[in-house]
Each structure stands twice: as C-alpha cells, then as structure tokens.
Amino acid sequence: MTMAMTSNFVLVVLLLERCIPWLSHYELKVPVVSDYVSNVISYVVLFILPCASINYLLIFRHRRYKKLLKKYPYYQGKLFVAYFLISLLLPVVLLWIGILFSRLPEGRSVRVHLLTEVSCVATPKAGTAYIGKKKGPDKNPARFKSNIL
C-alpha cells in the first residue's frame, strides 16, 4: 500500500512542478555521496517515508486496523488490487499521452470538447503549446502560451 501511495504522491508532485512553474522543486541533495546514492536517499526521504508514516499514523498506530476490520467488510483483496494497478498504470498512461502530444506536427490542431472548444497547437519547442478559443487566427498567440505535460 505504501508503494501505491508513493506512486500517486510522485505523480502529484511531478504534475504540480510541471504545471506551476514558480513552485519550488521538491528535491533533496546529499553532496557527500555519489549521484545515484543521493537520488536513492532523496527518493526514500521525500516520497517513501511520508507515505509510510501516514500509513502508520492512520492505520497501525494503537492497533486501529482492528477497529477498521470490524467496521468495513473484507472483499478478498479486490479493492487493493484495483487501487494498486491504477496507481502503477496511471503514470504510464499519462506518459504515453504526453509522448503522443509532443510528437504532433507543427500547426496541427487537437480539439478538446469540455465546456468550450479549445485549440492546442504544438510548437517546435517540446512541451509548449498555445491554448485558446477556436475563433480564427489570433494576432497575439503568445498570450495563450502555456506549458503542457
């Protein structure tokens, strides 16, 4: 369960760092060891330990899991399997979508129908697109500039 929570936490932090440019980077550097060991320590301290401590405090502390087992029915692990698979497959699916949209030829338009029709035009710079209502040619496309995926 901690690994699934860690996967979700990593995804949320990456999306926030990607979508909000002024957000500080969530990282920890240990300069006295090699880069590989520093990255492993950073991952453990910043992602695994918070999720493990939340699991401990909310479930295992004071044997709360016994109360939870009495209160909620057991579904033979079906809910855990669904949560675990979604947690591990969602980042892969989002990566595929990001690769798909980064390889659009320049000038090609993709329409997304939410509340209004939105045009997303891929540019040569990877990850940058212009977003706005599809009304016709815009004189100032830079005002719609946004970082996507």
Image: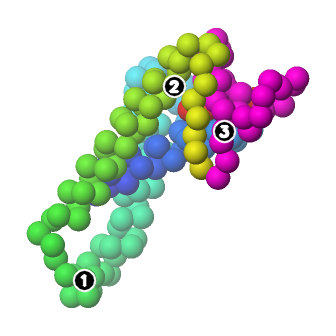
Whole-percent x, y for residue 72 in the image: 25, 83
Query: What quarter of the picture does the C terminus occupy?
Result: top right
Magenta residues, start to end: 115-144
Say if mark 3 contacts mark 1, CB within 8 Å: no
Quarter residue 133 falls in: top right
- Determine if the magenta segment contains residue 119: yes
Q: Is residue 148 visible?
A: yes
Q: Amino acid at mark 2?
A: Phe
Q: Amino acid at mark 1?
A: Tyr
The residue that label 2 is drawn on is 101
In this figure, what is the number of numbered marks?
Answer: 3
Circle 3: element type = strand
Quarter residue 16 falls in: top right
Disc 1 vs disc 2: which is toward the camera? 2
Instruction: From the viewer's perspective, tell me whether residue 65 is left or right of residue 146.
Output: left
Which of 146 and 27 lies nearest the eye of the viewer?
A: 146
Instruction: From the viewer's perspective, tell me whether residue 1 is left or right of residue 129.
Output: left
Query: What quarter of the picture does the N terminus occupy?
Result: bottom left
10 Å crowding of disc 3: few (<14), some (14-19), many (20+): some
Say if mark 2 contacts mark 3, CB within 8 Å: no
Q: Compared with residue 117, is residue 120 higher up or lower down, i.e. above or below?
A: above
Q: Compared with residue 144, is residue 46 higher up or lower down, i.e. above or below?
A: below
Q: Amino acid at mark 3?
A: Val
Which residue is depicted at the point 40% across and 61% down?
A: 53
Whole-percent x, y for residue 114 in the image: 60, 49
The residue that label 1 is drawn on is 72
Measure the alpha-carbon separation of dots 3 and 1. 44 Å
Q: Is residue 17 visible?
A: no
Sequence-wise, the earlier of marks 1 and 2 is: 1
Which residue is depicted at the point 40% across and 23% down?
A: 36
The residue that label 3 is drawn on is 118
Measure the alpha-carbon separation of dots 1 and 2. 42 Å
